[in-house]
Structure formats: C-alpha cells, structure tokens
Image (tube, rainbow, N blue to C red):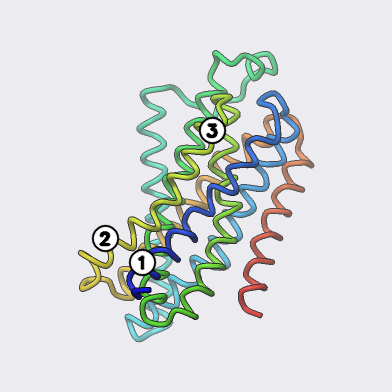
C-alpha cells in the first residue's frame, strides 16, 4: 500500500472515532434529564482535562522549541489560550445579541417545553462544541498524517490515542444536539462531521500548508483551541448540566470524563 494512502486511511479512522461517541445519543430519551446532566458533566470533564493536560502542554512545548526559550513559549501559549477564549466569547456574544441570552436561568416548566429557549441553547452548545473539536482535530489530522507517512508504526500509535480521545469528544457534540432536537440522526452527523476535520487537516496540510506549518503555527493553534474548549466547558456545559437540577451527577460526570481522558493518555504512554 502506498505510504500516502496508508496515512490518509489512518487519519480517517482516527477522526471518525467521534462517530462512536455520538452513538451514545441512542441510549437515552430526550426527557432523561439525569442522563443529560451526567453526560454534559462528562463532556466538560473531557474538554477541561484534555485542554489543560494535553493540548496546552503541547502548545507550550512547540512554542518553546520555536522561540528557543521556555519563558517565551509559555508566554506565547498563554496569549494564544486567552486569545482563543476571547474569540469564542465574542462569537457567543454576537449570536446571543440576535437570539437572546441562552444562559439565563429558566423555570422547570420552561425546561420541559420543547418550544422554548432551552432547546436553542443546547443546540447552540452542541454546534460550538463541534466547532471547537473540529478546529482541534485539524492540526491533529496533519500531525497524524505526517507521522504515518514518515513512520507508520509511530503514526498508527498516535492515531489510536487520538481515536480514544475522539470517542468522548463525540459525546460532547452529540448529547446536547440530541437533547435539543430529539433527532438521533442530527446528533450522529454533527459529531461525525466534526471528526472529518482530521481528514481535511491532512489534505489541506499536505497539499497547501505543509511548507508553512511550523512549531509556531502548531503551538498557537493548539493554545487557542484549549482556550475555546475551556470557555465552552465553563460557560455552557457545566452551567447547563447543573441547571437541570442534578448537581452531584454533573460533578460525577465531570470526574468520570477526566478519568477517561487520563486513562487514554496513560495507555498511550505505556
């Protein structure tokens, strides 16, 4: 098999693992708020842990290498991190200006009414999460492709780790979309599509950006994505999980999400 073909296949398999996570949308009804609270907390735990422990650390390492200084690398990564938060906060504000504030507290009756704002908030949350994961997956796709092309064994190992990560990330997209729309099909396809960004990253990176892609670009992108994912977790996922009246379940889900990501990293390092 051609090294290029193998690299694309490995990258595709890693990216589409988000679809596995999205299948969990089939396991609960849209009215099961306990499951929703637990799942949103789980999603927040996944995104917070992977942002601080993996993505931001990689950004600091890349920028330290590029700048030749750990202090500069940390500084640039910090600026990128808060830059990502600023970008997603601005997008959130612009959307809310047109559609009202989705973060206002509402009564239990409003939460049970599919015609009111809760459904719109959950859908927006799912779309924001899909966007953040897609951006995250873009450089991952490039990294997986290049590693597999240069050294198949290394690339496949990276792809397995990324695939494990992408399964709970698929949950983060599919759960809010499913509970907002009641459509398993939409929940699956939004999650599935966010994983396609890995293949897009491989294609664009290989044919267009490869000559410009360096540690600076990689580091800034990863730092920004970490900021975006942290903002989504704290501004949307956790508040919504707790608003459904199951505080402890959302925290248990948060810890479980962190544990799953931690285990995936441990398995990859062993």
Reading the image, the residue beneath label 2 is 204
Which residue is depicted at the point 60% across and 37% down? 175
Residue 237 visible within the image: yes
Q: Earlier in the sequence, mark 3 or mark 2?
A: 3
Reading the image, the residue beneath label 3 is 177
Q: Earlier in the sequence, mark 3 or mark 1?
A: 1
The reply to whether callout 3 and callout 2 are in contact (CB within 8 Å) is no
Q: Is residue 111 above or below residue 173?
A: above
Q: Residues within 10 Å of mark 1 (few under 14, many from 20)?
A: many
**Residue 116 image offset from top left, x and y in percent:** 55, 15
Q: How many angstroms separate mark 1 from mark 2 (CA)?
A: 8 Å
Q: Secondary structure at mark 3?
A: helix
Q: Earlier in the sequence, mark 1 or mark 2?
A: 1
The reply to whether callout 1 and callout 2 are in contact (CB within 8 Å) is yes
In the rendered image, which quarter contains the C terminus?
Answer: bottom right
Which one is nearer the viewer's eye here, 126 or 146?
A: 146
In the rendered image, which quarter contains the N terminus?
Answer: bottom left
Q: Residues within 10 Å of mark 3 (few under 14, many from 20)?
A: many
Reading the image, the residue beneath label 1 is 142
What is the total number of numbered labels drawn onto the structure image?
3
**Residue 132 image offset from top left, x and y in percent:** 44, 49
Q: Residue furthest front?
A: 1
Q: Secondary structure at mark 1?
A: helix
Which residue is depicted at the point 42% across and 82% down? 151
Q: Is residue 78 above or below residue 92?
A: below
Which residue is depicted at the point 50% across and 24% down? 120
Q: Is residue 29 above or below residue 241?
A: above
Q: Residues within 10 Å of mark 2 (few under 14, many from 20)?
A: some
Q: How many angstroms separate mark 3 from mark 1 (CA)?
A: 28 Å
């Amino acid at each position: 098999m051609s090294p290029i073909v193998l690299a694309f296949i490995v990258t595709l398999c890693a990216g589409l693992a988000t679809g596995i996570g999205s299948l969990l949308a089939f396991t609960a009804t849209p009215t099961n708020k306990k499951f929703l609270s637990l799942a949103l907390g789980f999603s927040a735990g996944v995104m917070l842990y992977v942002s601080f422990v993996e993505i931001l650390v990689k950004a600091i390492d890349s920028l330290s290498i590029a700048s030749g200084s750990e202090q500069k690398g940390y500084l640039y990564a910090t600026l990128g991190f808060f830059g990502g938060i600023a970008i997603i906060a601005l997008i959130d504000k612009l959307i809310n200006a047109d559609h009202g504030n989705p973060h206002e507290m509402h009564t239990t009756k409003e939460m049970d009414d599919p015609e009111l704002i809760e459904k719109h908030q959950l859908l927006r949350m799912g779309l924001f999460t899909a966007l953040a994961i897609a951006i995250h997956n873009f450089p991952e796709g490039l990294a997986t492709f290049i590693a597999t092309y240069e050294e198949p064994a290394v690339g496949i190992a990276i792809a397995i780790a990324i695939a494990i990560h992408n399964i709970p990330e698929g949950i983060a997209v599919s759960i809010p979309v499913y509970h907002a729309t009641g459509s398993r099909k939409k929940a699956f396809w939004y999650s599935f599509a966010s994983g396609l960004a890995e293949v897009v990253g491989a294609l664009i990176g290989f044919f267009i950006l490869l000559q410009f892609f360096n540690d600076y670009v990689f580091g800034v992108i990863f730092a920004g994505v970490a900021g975006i994912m942290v903002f989504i977790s704290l501004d949307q996922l956790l508040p919504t999980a707790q608003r459904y009246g199951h505080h402890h379940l959302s925290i248990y889900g948060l810890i479980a999400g962190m544990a799953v990501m931690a285990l995936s990293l441990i398995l990859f390092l062993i």
